[in-house]
Amino acid sequence: MGFTVAQGLMLLLLIASTMAVSKANRGCKFGNRPFCHPHHPNNTRTSNRIIVGDSYHWNFGFNYTDWAIKHGPFYLNDTLIFKYDPPSPNTFPHSVYLLPNLRSFTKCNLRKATMVGNVTQGSGEGFEFELKRPRQRYYFACGERNGFHCVNGTMKFFVKPIFR
């Protein structure tokens, strides 16, 4: 009773898939993976104050979508702190808009967006935005230069807070 070619290929596929999954989860018990829940830096019992972009703050050229993926999950009542330089001859101005839906976020359409931080509010200690609504997606983007910083794909991200 031998294997057919199809059975041999299925066995090979099963072994390769098992090895890929185990390699992807390697190190998870030690907390070296950003998606390992129990060891994630935002996995606390109280609400957190999170500086958007960490030490990069809210600046052009940093990928905030990647940042949000690495720092998630975000929880109800967490506070996002947006810090950015005030307008000057040496810096580009930044602002923060809350976009109403995924379509506006994808297209960087600011027509129905709400400005939550103007060009001066991010200076100093920055301004705070509390995630108050559970399971609602919050779509953030820089709206300066007609949304150019959003359109290039870096100065935008979204979060969906969950219950702790």
Image: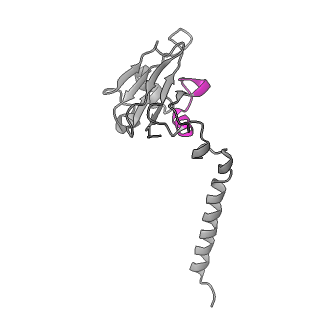
Decide which of 84, 44 is in the foreground and name it: 44
Q: Which residue ends up furthest to the bottom in the rendered image?
A: 1
- The quarter of the picture where residue 1 lies is bottom right
Identify which residue, 75 or 4, lies in the foreground.
Answer: 75
Query: Residue at left 60%, top 24%?
Result: 56
110 sits to left or right of 142: left
Q: Is residue 50 left or right of residue 101?
A: right
In the image, residue 101 lies at what x, y percent?
A: 34, 36
- Provide residue 141's location: percent of width, then percent of height: 44, 28
Of 155 and 162, which appears nearest the observer?
Answer: 162
Per the rendered image, the range of residues in magenta is 54-71
The answer to whether residue 117 is above or below residue 2 is above
User: Does residue 76 sit above or below 114 in this rendering?
Assistant: below
> Which residue sits at x=37%, y=30%?
99
Residue located farthest toward the left when viewing the structure as drawn: 112
Total number of numbered discs in the rendering: 0
**Residue 163 in the image: x percent, y percent?**
44, 40
Q: Main secondary structure of the magenta part?
A: helix
Q: Is residue 55 magenta?
A: yes
- The residue positioned farthest toward the front in the image shown: 45
> What residue is at 54 percent from the left and 28 percent from the top?
50
Let me know if residue 23 is in the magenta part.
Answer: no
Q: How is the image coloured?
A: one colour
